[in-house]
Image: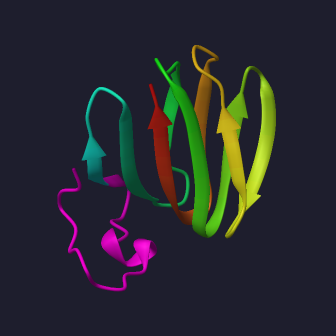
Amino acid sequence: MYKNIETQKVLQLKELVAYQAGQVVSRTLVQNDKVSMTVFSFDKGEEISTHASGGDAMVTVLEGTGRFTVGGKVFILKAGETLIMPKDVPHAVYGEERFKMQLTVSF
């Protein structure tokens, strides 16, 4: 079930999280044993350090530019671009500039 989000309303996902200086901000939209969906904003230079997920993770950049390191390979994504980060493969996320993304993890 969706939470922290209005239903039956046209929304812009990038508007669901605001930028905050020196921070990564997140808003969880779905969290259960099959799927997790979260919208993030990253201030420039902020990061989520290397970790692995118990499910396949799909990120779509909503605004700005982010750097994703997946299994040692670097990907620079801009608004509208999507990347799949496979289950159990170490990955990290870094704000090349302020950016927002949607993360969906399928377990």
Classify residue 6 by image quadrant.
bottom left
Q: Is residue 35 left or right of residue 58?
A: left
Name the spot of residue 88 as percent of width and height, x first: 58, 13
Q: Residue furthest bottom?
A: 10
User: x, y (%) of residue 82?
Assistant: 69, 54
Please say whether residue 53 is one of the residues in the magenta stretch. no
Q: Residue at x 55, y 52 (%)?
A: 45
Q: Which stretch is magenta?
A: 1-26
Residue 16 is drawn in which quadrant?
A: bottom left
Q: Is residue 35 above or below residue 54?
A: below
Residue at point 27% right, 50% down? 28
- Rendered location of residue 57, percent (x, y): 55, 35
* Along the line of sight, the residue nearer the viewer: 23 or 12: 12
Q: Is residue 9 magenta?
A: yes
Report the predominant secondary structure element of the magenta stretch: loop
User: Which color scheme did the rendering employ for the protein?
Assistant: rainbow
Q: Is residue 66 above or below residue 49?
A: below
Left or right: residue 80 versus residue 87 is right
Residue drawn 73% across the image and 20% down it: 71
Q: Position of residue 98 (x, y in %)?
A: 54, 66
Q: Which residue corresponds to the image point at 47% horizontal and 36% vertical from the top-left? A: 105
In the displayed structure, does residue 47 sit left or right of residue 3? Answer: right
Give the vertical position of 64 relative to 51 (above or below).
Answer: below
Quadrant for the C terminus in the image: top left
Count of all numbered marks drawn on residues in the image: 0
